[in-house]
Image (cartoon, grey):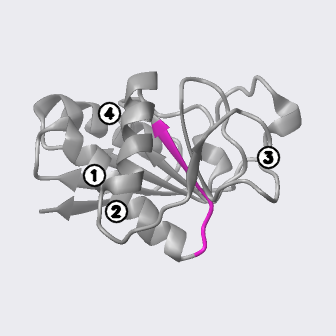
């Protein structure tokens, strides 16, 4: 779907990624980060490999910190994405931003207001929207684009 800058590290696109939109009632941006932590933890416990794509270096750093402390007793092994292929010692969760393609993975958790060019290398994409007008507006646009490209997104309303 997107053009790849580094074909030597990019897997073949998934035939038809499953797209899920999680629409939060809360409108503060931190709600997206907290929900991303919960979703990453749940997905990690299902033995899946995850990449969390953020909108900026600052958001990447905030999420990196939050994943260590968001819930007492939780352990969510993660590391910042370097754009290099994943090796056998890599953490099952990577966090990154920008156009650099992430390593192989099963699930993409997107915290951006645009569709990452590499979304189709993942079996599943989780788009997280907060309750703000801006977030929902950009989410509707992404939903339409996914539909127009042959995907069947599913929406989950989160209280």
Residue corresponding to mark 2: 38
**SS of the residue under disc 4:** helix
Question: Could you tell me how far apart the alpha carbons at marks 4 and 3 are, in whole angstroms?
Answer: 27 Å
Q: Nearer the viewer, residue 21 or 34?
A: 34
Which sits earlier in the primary sequence, circle 2 or circle 4?
2
Which sits earlier in the primary sequence, circle 1 or circle 3?
3
**SS of the residue under disc 3:** loop
Which sits earlier in the primary sequence, circle 4 or circle 3?
3
Question: Could you tell me how far apart the alpha carbons at marks 2 and 4 are, in whole angstroms?
Answer: 25 Å
Residue corresponding to mark 1: 34
Residue corresponding to mark 3: 11
**Residue at the outermost right position:** 8
Asked whether residue 143 is in view, the answer is: yes
Which sits earlier in the primary sequence, circle 4 or circle 1?
1
Percent across and percent down for residue 152 are: 44, 57
**Residue at (62, 61) in percent of width and height:** 49
Quadrant into which the C terminus falls? bottom left
Q: Determine if the magenta segment contains residue 128.
A: no
**Residue at (60, 68) in percent of width and height:** 48
């Amino acid at each position: 779907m997107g053009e790849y800058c580094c074909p030597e590290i990019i897997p073949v696109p998934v035939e038809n990624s499953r797209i899920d939109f999680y629409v939060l009632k809360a409108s503060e941006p931190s709600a997206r980060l907290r929900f991303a932590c919960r979703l990453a933890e749940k997905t990690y416990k299902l033995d899946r490999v995850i990449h969390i794509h953020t909108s900026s270096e600052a958001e990447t750093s905030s999420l990196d910190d939050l994943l260590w402390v968001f819930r007492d007793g939780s352990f969510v092994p993660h590391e910042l994405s370097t754009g290099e292929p994943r090796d056998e010692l890599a953490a099952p969760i990577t966090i990154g931003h920008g156009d650099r393609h992430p390593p192989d993975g099963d699930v993409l958790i997107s915290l951006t207001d645009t569709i990452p060019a590499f979304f189709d290398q993942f079996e599943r994409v989780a788009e997280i929207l907060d309750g703000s007008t801006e977030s929902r507006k950009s989410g509707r646009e992404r939903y339409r684009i996914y539909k127009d490209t042959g995907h069947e997104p599913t929406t989950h309303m989160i209280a």
